[in-house]
Image (spheres, rainbow, N blue to C red):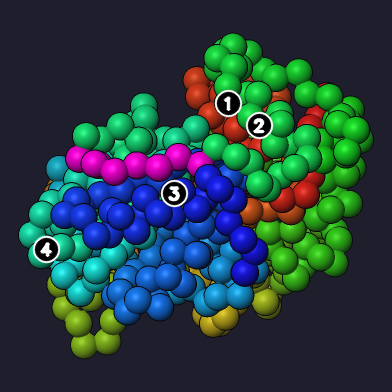
Amino acid sequence: MIKLTQGQRQALEKLKSFLRSNHSFFRLSGYAGTGKSFLICHLIEWLDAHDFEFVIAAPTNKAAKSLIQVGTAVGINIDVKTVAQLLGQQPEINEETGEEEFTSAGDAEFDDYDVMIIDEFSMINRSNFEEIVTAIASTINTKVIFVGDEAQLPPVKEQQPIVAISEAIDDTATLDQVVRYEGEIALVAEKIRREELYARRMYDFQTSPDQTIVCQPRKEWLETVTEYFQADNCKSNPDYTRLLVWRNKTAGDANRFVRSRLWGKEAPIFVPGDRLIARKPLFRVRPGQKGKNRWGVLINNSEECSVIEQPTIKELSFDKIAYQYRSVPVKTDAGFEVNLSVLTEQGERLRDEMIKDYVAKKQWNKYFDLSRTFDDVTYAYSLTVHKAQGSSIDYVFLDTEDMQGCPDLQKMLYTALTRAKVRVYIPL
């Protein structure tokens, strides 16, 4: 394995001292490219060699996938859970609001672990953090190491990442030497992060001498978008290229544009080869289970899959009402094949009417079952920066025009730029 820098070695010694202390929480901070994940791989090897029982978690599957890739690159196999899995959470309906929320099935139990490493702490919301703190208080001596970049976007509806400011965390270390992104992307991202004026004003992007940032007139930029999405590499590697935006509406427009270039303007709604992403957890009924245990998560929120065959139109009756839907054969990134049940436009309208009716009558079981019977997916060519957070993408197309007026502009740009491994394309 590559040797650690002096700063990384000092942070590793602090981590080892923390593990010998009676403190419970450690925060390892570092901006993009400072080698946080690389250092954690060294720590994992050390923990393994010294017979620690440990677990690794990340807020999303994309973040988990990125950490696994770092481990593979340095020659170690890492098994990463999501924070929801770590906390034993299941999506449930809030009977006051009708919204689906993640709640723990019971008190999270961490006594099985000596050490818990939780990556991408900027994405951990206050509720999950407080649940972790509460659970740790009832353990004998379980340690939690939070790893992340506080300059990235905070969780939705929160001003700052709670892990970055919490007084519950006694021990900290900060990595400040950039060891990755030696190109212009890193320098620009760092400048945007440091200078407060970019919280209000768009950065004046220019094509860099090393071509890691390329600016093009918008028409030419769209042609380059097309070229990359049509490339063979894109078919085999979902993170070869993505078009990143601020707003969901813009992501929808961008996805339609990419599909029109891939399959033509008159293409069916789903075509073999289409990349899809779950907008919320997708469920299936568990045989022999009842009540809250009746439904199990098949595909998690933001997990992706590829369409493998043409869909067929089918009909399903629920509460004496027939719903028309498309049965879409897909293969998930986890490698299994399944048929998604995606409502037709008419079926969606009918479902929405019945959902309102069930909410008005507080018929929560019917609401719950109907909400989970059909699958909510969209195309995955364009993502919001929030959705892309935690992932690593070879070639990023960054729609800066869409980001004008974003209240989190500075963190939005920084987070988007630091997703790129090779190059960022900017429209003029």
Q: Is residue 241 left or right of residue 107?
A: right
Which quarter of the figure is the C terminus placed in?
top right
x, y percent for residue 20: 24, 60
Label 3 neighbourhood size at 10 Å, few (<14), some (14-19), many (20+)?
many
Q: In which quarter of the image is residue 292?
A: bottom left
Front label number (3 vs 4): 3
Give yes or no for contact between labels 2 and 3 (Cβ–Cβ under 8 Å).
no
Mark linked to residue 380: none
User: Which residue is tagged 2?
Assistant: 189
**Percent x, y for residue 382?**
66, 47
Q: Main secondary structure of the magenta part?
A: strand
Q: Which of marks 1 and 3 is nearer the N terminus?
A: 3
For this view, does 212 lie left or right of residue 49? right
Q: Could you say where residue 371 lies in the image, as x and y percent from the top left?
A: 33, 59
| 247 left or right of 98 in image | right
**Of the residues under marks 3 and 4, which one precedes in the sequence?**
3
First in sequence, mark 4 or 2: give its number.
Answer: 4
Q: Residue furthest bottom?
A: 288
Mark 2 packing: few (<14 Cα in 10 Å), some, or many (20+)? many
Query: Is there CB contact under 8 Å for labels 2 and 1?
Result: yes
